């Protein structure tokens, strides 16, 4: 346990049902009157934006909407967003969507500040600065991106998911309103919820974990155990949605301080090579990586067990996966890609805080155990 730590959460948070209504006031009191709303087509078509846009309009904030965000965002989609921002000259970005949307908005702001058109060039910028305030309104409960200064962008040429992080990329304000998540379909609720769970579990087992991060993630895990199934089965259950939104936020706040682990190091490769949903890839890997890690952290595994009343954590997870037919058989990976993915996973920043050191051979085996391998 690390009990010397820095813990800075630069992004203020407004949390609770109905909090999105405060967005116009939050812009106006910062003197902002021209917003570019960054979103994807699914969120726009679900009608989630309508009350937000009406509220902004009533407050005298001029809005233009760009719905070009793609899942597993890449350099091209960020570039398109930069061009839209340059044409519209907003004084704020309002990101409404899942992790891909929030990351895209943060990347656009970072690139504009640095004067670069290619998002990967941000890695070379010594002192990045966010030029535009970014307001994050998550419509999923999973990534924790609303309080994180990391963005993950896929390099389509090399199939790598590149993590770019700097405190300057921190959102200006996170508005976490569980009402915005009510229409999320069951499958996406499950996958994003399991992403939040994976963040919490990996941050808990991280070699950089602190007593403060442990407090946050233990609460996050308890909330997921209590409410994930209900949020999937009864999408309009506001209490369950609120629990999941809080779990995602707590895990997100913890993970950027203490890092993650091998699940994320490996799932980023699966996302980069095969465009698999991030939450699904994590969900498939989680039980296998936990079994691999368990001998190195028996006390923490016992604590995880104690967070699930009446059965162990792994038993609970198994039951959940059976209920929703979650299995690696449904996602194919190619045998020829496994060595490269394993090399990259071992070198990935998330692997550095995994409780058990994994060699390339270990990781190749974990890939083969977790997914359906095809020639
Ligand atoms: Fe994640």
Image: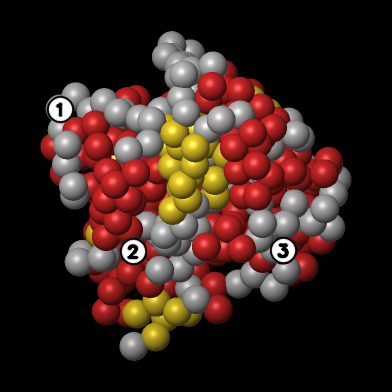
Residue marked by disc 1: 126
Above or below 271: residue 289? above
Above or below 173: residue 118? below
- Whether label 1 touches label 2, CB < 8 Å: no
Residue 355 falls in image quadrant = top left
Which is more N-terminal, label 3 or label 1? Answer: 1
Which is more N-terminal, label 2 or label 3? Answer: 3
Q: Nearer the viewer, residue 211 or 331?
A: 331
The residue at the point 19 percent across, 49 percent down is 118
Above or below 106: residue 230? below
Evaluate whether residue 318 shows in this view: no
- Whether label 1 touches label 3, CB < 8 Å: no
Distance from disc 3 to disc 2, alpha carbons, whole Å, reads 24 Å
Residue marked by disc 2: 272
Quadrant location of the C terminus in the rendered image: bottom left
Percent of width and height locating residue 9: 48, 20
- Whether label 3 touches label 2, CB < 8 Å: no
Side of 111 where 286 appears, left or right: right
Above or below 372: residue 361? above
Distance from disc 1 to disc 3, alpha carbons, whole Å, reads 42 Å
Q: Nearer the viewer, residue 24 or 354?
A: 24
Residue marked by disc 3: 186
The residue at the point 39 percent across, 85 percent down is 374
Dot in front, 1 or 2: 1
**Disc sitting over residue 288 in the figure:** none
Evaluate whether residue 61 shows in this view: yes
Which is more N-terminal, label 2 or label 1? Answer: 1
The residue at the point 49 percent across, 42 percent down is 63
């Amino acid at each position: 346990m690390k009990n010397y730590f820095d813990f800075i959460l630069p992004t203020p948070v407004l949390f609770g049902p109905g909090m999105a209504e405060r967005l116009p006031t939050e812009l106006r009191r910062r003197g902002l009157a021209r917003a570019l709303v960054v979103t994807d087509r699914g969120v726009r078509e679900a009608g989630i934006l309508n009350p937000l846009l009406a509220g902004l309009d009533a407050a005298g904030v001029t809005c233009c909407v760009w719905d070009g965000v793609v899942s597993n965002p890449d350099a091209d989609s960020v570039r398109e967003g930069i061009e839209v921002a340059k044409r519209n000259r907003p004084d704020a970005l309002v990101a409404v969507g899942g992790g891909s949307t929030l990351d895209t908005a943060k990347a656009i702001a970072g690139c504009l500040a640095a004067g670069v058109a290619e998002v990967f060039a941000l890695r070379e910028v010594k002192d990045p600065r966010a030029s535009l305030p970014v307001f994050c309104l998550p419509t999923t409960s999973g990534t924790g991106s609303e309080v994180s200064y990391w963005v993950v962008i896929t390099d389509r040429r090399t199939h790598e998911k590149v993590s770019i992080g700097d405190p300057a990329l921190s959102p200006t304000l996170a508005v976490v309103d569980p009402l915005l998540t009510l229409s999320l379909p069951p499958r996406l609720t499950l996958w994003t919820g399991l992403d939040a769970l994976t963040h919490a579990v990996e941050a808990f087992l991280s070699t950089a974990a602190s007593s403060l991060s442990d407090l946050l993630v233990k609460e996050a895990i308890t909330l997921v155990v209590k409410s994930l199934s209900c949020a999937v089965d009864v999408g309009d259950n506001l209490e369950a949605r609120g629990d999941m939104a809080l779990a995602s936020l707590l895990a997100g706040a913890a993970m950027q301080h203490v890092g993650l682990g091998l699940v994320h190091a490996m799932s980023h490769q699966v996302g980069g090579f095969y465009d698999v949903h991030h939450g699904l890839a994590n969900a498939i890997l989680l039980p296998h990586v936990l079994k691999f890690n368990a001998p190195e952290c028996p006390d923490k595994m016992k604590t995880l067990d104690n967070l699930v009343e009446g059965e162990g954590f792994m038993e609970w997870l198994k039951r959940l996966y059976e209920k929703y037919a979650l299995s690696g058989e449904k996602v194919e990976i190619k045998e020829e890609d496994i060595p490269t993915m394993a090399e990259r996973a071992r070198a990935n920043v998330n692997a550095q805080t995994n409780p058990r050191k994994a060699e390339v051979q270990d990781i190749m085996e974990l890939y083969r155990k977790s997914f359906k391998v095809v020639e």
